């Protein structure tokens, strides 16, 4: 049984409260597919409601902490919340159950605590710096460990590219990886991809053009589960450079055995 600090428990309860109405909204999505205008407005209202609830609940935990979303500038000092109200909004809008709420508490650029929650599947992942990463269970919480897979030919890798920024980047990643790995998945939620690497479901994930809010929680999960995080074009991988990852939004998150191999393959 994992120890859950008061801070982490508050994060979990806040995320669950914000995610409950989102589950109801998700069940209504299919009925709205035939109305484009109404459908878009419904999704926008759902996201706004999640963000509002998260901010209200988290403000009770740390009243003086500001909120950082998407590509907002981070404070130079002090603590703050990082929230991604609905990572995988396109999936949500199309009735696909791969989306998540992502929340982290940071001190400067150090992620101290994190929660990623998929309300459609009722899967919640959480971590606190130095205390490990876990998946919530009914009786006992499951400690997360990255996979032990060593052979790239057997690896399952998740890709996520904001392709409207530069569609060629996706092609480069695909061509660099497909001949050498066991399979590639494009799920549509960077936060969930990172959580699944921490849980050993994916052996690695490569994701480009993310905002800080999409990465913060998942990075802590992977690190606390024994994995490694690199910037995709990082020159020296003898140590991680999280500042570069957060600055560029381009990330390799992988188990300890494959991280170096994947970095090398992408930078041939």
Image (cartoon, rainbow, N blue to C red):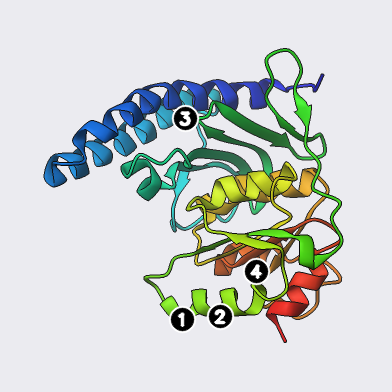
Query: Measured from the top left, where is residue 99 in percent x and y?
Result: 47, 41
Observer able to see residue 78: no
Residues at discs 1 and 3 in contact (Cβ within 8 Å): no
Q: Is residue 189 left or right of residue 25?
A: right
**Residue under the point 65% across and 54% down:** 109
Residues at discs 1 and 2 in contact (Cβ within 8 Å): yes
Residues at discs 4 and 1 in contact (Cβ within 8 Å): no
User: Which quadrant is the C terminus positioned in?
Assistant: bottom right
Q: Is residue 100 left or right of residue 105?
A: left
Tell which circle, 2 or 3, labels the residue nearer the N-terminal end.
Answer: 3
Foreground residue among 32 and 50: 32
Residue 43 badge: none
Tell which circle, 2 or 4, labels the residue nearer the N-terminal end.
Answer: 2
Q: How many marks?
A: 4
Query: Measured from the top left, where is residue 80 in percent x and y?
Result: 55, 42
Residue 168 badge: 1
Observer able to see residue 4: yes
**Which element type, helix, strand or loop, lies under badge 3?**
loop
Residue 244 badge: 4
Marks 2 and 4, how far apart at CA: 21 Å
Marks 1 and 3, how far apart at CA: 32 Å
Q: Residue 1 lies in what quarter of the image? A: top right
**Which element type, helix, strand or loop, lies under badge 1?**
helix
**Residue under the point 39% across and 73% down:** 165
Tell which circle, 4 or 1, labels the residue nearer the N-terminal end.
Answer: 1
Compared with residue 165, is residue 196 higher up or lower down, i.e. above or below?
above
Marks 1 and 2, how far apart at CA: 6 Å
Query: Measured from the top left, where is residue 87 in percent x and y?
Result: 45, 46
Q: Is residue 99 left or right of residue 151?
A: left
Residue at numbered disc 3: 120
Residue at numbered disc 2: 172
């Amino acid at each position: 049984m994992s120890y859950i600090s008061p801070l982490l428990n508050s994060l979990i309860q806040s995320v669950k409260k914000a995610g409950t109405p989102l589950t109801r909204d998700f069940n209504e999505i299919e009925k709205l597919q035939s109305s484009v205008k109404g459908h878009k407005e419904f999704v926008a209202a759902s996201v706004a409601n999640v963000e509002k609830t998260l901010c209200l609940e988290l403000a009770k935990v740390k009243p003086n902490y500001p909120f950082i979303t998407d590509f907002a500038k981070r404070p130079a000092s002090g603590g703050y919340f990082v929230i991604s109200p609905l990572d995988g909004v396109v999936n949500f809008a199309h009735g696909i159950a791969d989306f998540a709420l992502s929340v982290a508490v940071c001190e400067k650029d150090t992620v101290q605590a994190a929660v990623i929650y998929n309300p459609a599947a009722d899967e919640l992942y959480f971590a606190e710096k130095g205390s490990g990463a876990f998946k919530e269970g009914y009786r006992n919480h499951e400690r997360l460990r990255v996979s032990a897979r060593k052979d790239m030919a057997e690896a399952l890798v998740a890709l996520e590219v904001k392709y409207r920024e530069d569609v060629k980047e996706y092609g480069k990643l695909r061509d660099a990886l497909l001949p050498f790995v066991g399979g590639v998945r494009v799920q549509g939620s960077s936060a969930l991809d990172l959580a699944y690497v921490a849980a050993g479901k994916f052996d690695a994930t490569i994701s480009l053009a993310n905002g800080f809010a999409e990465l913060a929680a998942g990075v802590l999960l992977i690190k606390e589960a024994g994995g490694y995080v690199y910037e995709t074009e990082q020159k020296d991988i003898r140590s991680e450079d999280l500042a570069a990852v957060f600055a560029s939004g381009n990330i390799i998150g992988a188990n300890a055995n494959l991280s170096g191999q994947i970095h090398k393959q992408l930078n041939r």
